Image (cartoon, grey):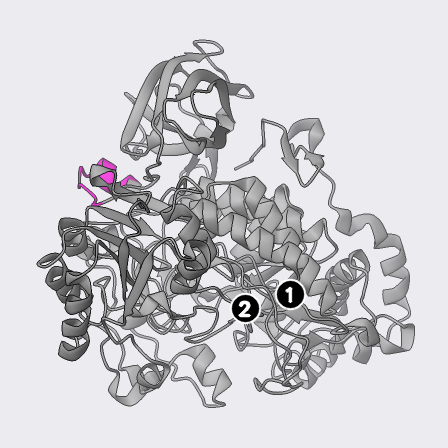
Amino acid sequence: MKFRVFLPILFAGMFLMSCIGGNNERVSKLVANDARIDEIIAGMTLEEKVAMLHGKYMFTSEGVPRLGIPDMVYADGPFGIREEMEAHSWNSLGLSNDSSTFFPTGSALAATWSEELAYAYGTGMAREARLRGKDMILGPAINIQRIPTGGRTYEYFSEDPWLSARLSVGYTLGVQDNGVAVCLKHFALNNQELNRGRVDVIVGQRAMREIYLPPFEAAVKEGDAYGVMAAYNKVGGFWCSENDLLQNVILRDEWGFKGLIISDWGGTHSTVNAALYGLDVEMPGSRFFGQALLDTINAGAVPVEIIDKKVKNILRVRLAIDPIPQEEANAVMTAKPEQAAIAYDIAAKSIVLLKNEGALLPLDLNNHPKIAVIGENAVRTMALGGVGAGVKAYNEITPLAGLQSRLGDKADLVYAQGYRGYTKQERENWANRPSPYRDADTELLNEAVNVAKDADIVLFIGGDNREVQTEGSDRSAITLPSGQDQLIEAISAVNNKIVSVFVTGGPLDLRVAERCSPAMLISWFNGSEAGHALADVLLGKVSPSGKLPFTFPVKLEDSPAYALGTYPQDPPPFNRGDVFVDLVQNRASAAVDDERNRAYYSEELLVGYRWFDTRDVAPLYPFGHGLSYSDFEYAGLDASKEKYKPGDDVSVTFEIKNNGSTEADEVVQLYVNRIGATVEWPAKELKAFQRLTLKAGESRKVTLAFPVSLLRYWDEATNGWSLESTDIDILVGSSSRDIRLTKRIKI
């Protein structure tokens, strides 16, 4: 599938236009030094070549010291530059200058629905990576959110391939325009943490091409991504790190990828197959691509020409990125005010207003109200926690601190903990894994109720934390943990003016909260400036404008993989561990090849809202939902013409007006519905969107466009893209279930 940006986008003062296809095929910057690279390779020994193909240190791979070519240094974490670690361990070096900006996590960025903000995000990440001497960021994390319980949902963007693709391109360009390489991860179909180091994904080619691969394809073709990380899992019976279809046929041959493919840490499984079928760098050690590879080459099982190609891929990236001299790295504090400003902007524009009955928000500060702030997440930080990458944050403003800062003496704030959140110690108790979905703590509940009784309004700040939503394990439910439903019900019995704020990276079961709370917001794991951003939205300084990047189901069993019984697969005992946790703890992973290790993607194309809309299952809150303190009026949808042919761009225009009394952002969304198609399709698919800022009373003409090629399908019979002639309803609105305008065209 080929993607285009059809409207000019101003990124950080730079006018960017990406065109794919025809005579406008973009040439990768990575090939600019190929002639020089060929000369370098011709002068290298075999031992020097092989030394480049595996980890030298935990986050470093070898350069060519004899020729003055520096090592490649990797930065862990897609939402902040991880602290410096010992060369051969996961232990911190304890430096004083390596505290970074904690950027809002992936689902928060996705909730902005803004490619421009994704570019700014990448810019901020690259700036701090450069200060730390890093060449490549291990991100963005761009897998599709297939299940609501996914442990890394907070890192990933969306359940929709188009939204994920646009954000992936923005992030990639932002990073690489500022002198650092990206490493897209995890390629591919890493959509669950449960058994991820053994699971074999069984998926149809059409669903793979149309749902799961577009974010990677867009970032490679439009963003010229320099790096790709192979996922832990198998696809179609083959490990991703040695998957010929994924790495050679699709990524390199079809998409023209010219950069390096790196393994996930501990995700290499063989020498010959990994070498022949696409992997360039084994991390973090040399078990398969060290002496074993040298022996294999000398035995004639792997041609030297294959090794030369791998070295060329690495050198392309190495020469495209200016190295930072070691003496200049970590010379100053990593976190900078410029990056804090980016983090604030993203956080403020990511917050989703789910409901606002009786206009309870923004908060009325007349008469000096007494505000009860209840919930552990009001004071809990989210930069660290769980398994995997975290951020040693320079600072993190909690919700309570943000309110205190912004309110001053305009209101009285009274805090009560309310519930006891899931802890690191509990999570690490692998042999007897406790559930975070326990009953409420009676003492804390009673204290919170007493505080709520005397308050003019209650701000309940709950949700999950980074120990519940974590790499290495999926959630067993989407219920609010630690008895929060009981707590909310008890509070509502004594005070019905409740604004509930949920800090989360993924969907939650909010049925109880929805019944008890006149107003509700989603605030995400929202970075260093989370508290300031939330306070500004609650107080009306910023009108909420975030949109859900995934569906919130009424109940977990409504979502497709659960409804079809294909997830969870018969789960293994927890003491079998996780591939990454096993690596960190230096223990062997169990390798069991049986039906428990097969994930059947039986829903095929019907991921997320596609399932809910096609099967007519009502969600609690739909994909794309998000309210504002203003009201927007849509009118006058028209298309540039009635009939479109292959190669055309579908272009529609309409008017939008801010009928409110405050400036606000709206995200306009365009979906398509095929009429009378003979090929099976979802009821609705996102094809374009745009974030707009409108002053109070302002009207604007909006144009949305997409290429006809985005209406193609992967024909499994011909193993290629096909376009069906049919009528198309263009659906424009404020969410996937709030369609305001419709126009029919013909393809």
| Number of other residues with Cα within 10 Å of mark 1, as a class: few under 14, some 14 to 19, many 20 or more | many
Residue extending furthest toward the left = 493
Q: Amino acid at mark 1?
A: Ala
Give SS at disc 1: loop
> Residue 335 has which mark?
1
Please identify the quarter of the rendering in which residue 28 is found: top right
Residue shown at the point (46%, 40%) measured from the top left: 162
In magenta segment, residue 609: no
Q: Which quarter of the figure has residue 373?
A: bottom left
Residue 333: give x, y in percent of width and height. Answer: 69, 70
Question: Is label 2 in contact with label 1 (beta carbons under 8 Å)?
Answer: yes
Residue 205 horizontal/vertical position (percent): 41, 47
Upstream in sequence: badge 2 or badge 1: 1
Residue 652 x, y percent position in the rendering: 46, 17
* C-alpha gap between disc 2 and disc 1: 9 Å
Q: Which residues make up the magenta segment?
A: 610-620
Q: Residue at x 44, y 33 (%)?
A: 664
* Residue located beneath label 2 in the image: 395
The quadrant in which residue 545 appears is top left
Horizontal side, residue 325 vs residue 745: left or right: right
Against 227, is 624 above or below?
above
Q: Judge whether residue 396 can be spotted in this image.
A: yes
Give me the residue at 56% from left, 49% from top: 250
**The C terminus lies in quadrant:** top left
